[in-house]
Image: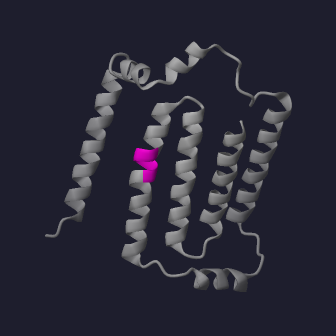
Amino acid sequence: MFLFIVFAAVAIVAAIGVVVSRRPVYSALFLLLNFATLAAMYIMLQAQFLAVAQVIVYAGAIVVLFLFVVMLIGGGELNDIRQRNLALGARLTWPRVMALILGLLLVIGLGYGIVTGQLYPTQGDATAFGLGSVEAIGQTLYTDYLLPFELTSVLLLVGMVGAVVLARND
């Protein structure tokens, strides 16, 4: 339990670092730290497949893509954007109002879940964790959901070919 709290605290600090960092490269590195701590928490929850998917898909691909884009467009500081926002003052535009409302609803929902006990883990037996194993997910994926899995792969292939066709030079 103590280790889970430590990882959760690191994940929260890293998430705050993503938002408040002045340099986009540092934000991407904080995001990588956040993904790594989430993967560690998945391992502690006996969800090895989710942990591996978290590392491969998010920490491996998404953060590398973010860093590539940041380096491509230039990863300078964000002073000009913040100065422009300060010059605008504390005007409440509709995106800010919606963000405040949605954030408040999230906090209310989490508080309700904690108070009523609906967010506490269930006290099941150890065999329930076998449902999240790689073997169980693979067995279900390649038997019950084979057609949607193959259709998804064809859809991703079509998207990849379309991106190559759009990006090529004439």
For the point 67% across and 61% down, the residue is 16
For the point 34% across and 16% down, the residue is 143
Q: Quadrant of the N terminus?
A: top right
Counting the numbered discs, the total is: 0
Q: Is residue 165 left or right of residue 71?
A: left
Q: What percent of the width, then of the height, locates residue 134?
A: 42, 26
For the point 55% across and 20% down, the residue is 129
Q: What percent of the width, then of the height, locates residue 124?
A: 66, 15
Q: Quadrant of the C terminus?
A: bottom left
Q: In the image, is residue 16 part of the stretch drawn in magenta?
A: no
Read off the magenta span.
Answer: 55-59
- The residue closer to the viewer here, 41 or 84, is 41
Q: What percent of the width, then of the height, locates residue 115?
A: 86, 33
- The residue closer to the viewer here, 145 or 128, is 128
For the point 24% across and 61% down, the residue is 166
Please tell me whether the stretch drawn in magenta is mainly helix, strand or loop: helix
